[in-house]
Image (cartoon, grey):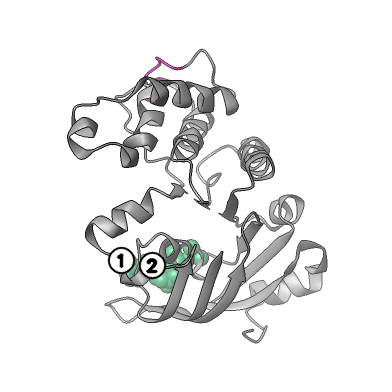
Amino acid sequence: MIEAKGLGVVFPNGTEALQDINVTIDDGEFVAVIGLSGAGKSTFLRTLNGLVRPTSGSVRVGGVEVGNLSGRSLSRFRRTVGFIFQQFNLVTRLTALENVLHGRLGYLPTWRGLLGLYGEGDYELAAGYLREVGLSGKENVRVDNLSGGQQQRVAIARAMAQQPQLVLADEPMASLDPRLSDVILGLLKSYNEARGVTVLVNIHVLELARRYARRVLAFNQGRLVFDGPAESLTDELAERIYAGSLEAL
Ligand code: ADP
């Protein structure tokens, strides 16, 4: 379960990126996070895996107070949270399989990770996840020889290889041809349904959020202004969300 209480983030330059966010997300939910660019979506996701620390309030994931973690406890926590970035964040000179194996690093003693000494089971898992995202046969291809859509699928397989409790995807289609949005969101949705893993996706295309998510969170200027089922997000409400004329929840 994810629980944010009075969560606020003020960056050192004074930008108030999140203000008094109160939200609970149950295990196994698929949630779309929407809002204009700069609304705080990415900051919200980043507080959930400890990439950004709350400056007020708290955020708990699976019972763990994320803002209090550091060092080894933060690394241990992070291995349970898969993060999918806009720009894929793969090691481009490595193969698809090697990138997916990186998802297993958190499970190896550091020295074995440094030497790339994965276990037999890790290879099988990684190949299985590549199959799950439709990339069988590409295991040994360097990722800089794959298309953008294929690279993002490798990144999804890497997140799956972490066997996470939570997957966070920060506008995973933003740098891809819009026609690929359905492939990426479809994979995340099937994974959520098949494995029961909680998925939060930042999506700036409203229509996609409506199509894939049962629940939508909308941010405006750092405030949570809508939290409800996708079907109650009418065009009129959406307009107000984007115009910034809704009161914070
Ligand atoms: P979104 O994901 O909705 O586009 P962000 O969470 O990235 O929004 O940004 C929210 C606000 O915080 C914006 O005003 C952005 O410029 C600011 N911001 C984001 N990251 C930083 C940072 N590291 N330092 C200062 N300001 C930041």
Residue 222 can be seen in this image: no
Q: Amino acid at mark 2?
A: Val
Q: Quadrant of ligand 1?
A: bottom left
Q: Nearer the viewer, residue 191 or 244?
A: 191
Query: What residue is shown with label 1?
Result: 69
Crowding around mark 2 (Cα neighbors within 10 Å: few <14, some 14 to 19, many 20+) is: many
Report the quarter where the N terminus lies.
bottom right
Q: Amino acid at mark 1?
A: Leu
Gap in Å between the C-alphas at discs 1 and 2? 6 Å
Residue 229 image label? none
Relative image position of residue 64 (x, y in whole percent): 42, 66
Q: Residue most toward the bottom?
A: 247
Residue 66 image label? 2
In the visual, does 180 lie left or right of 18? right
Dot 1 beta carbon under 8 Å from ligand 1: no
Relative image position of residue 3 (x, y in whole percent): 53, 72
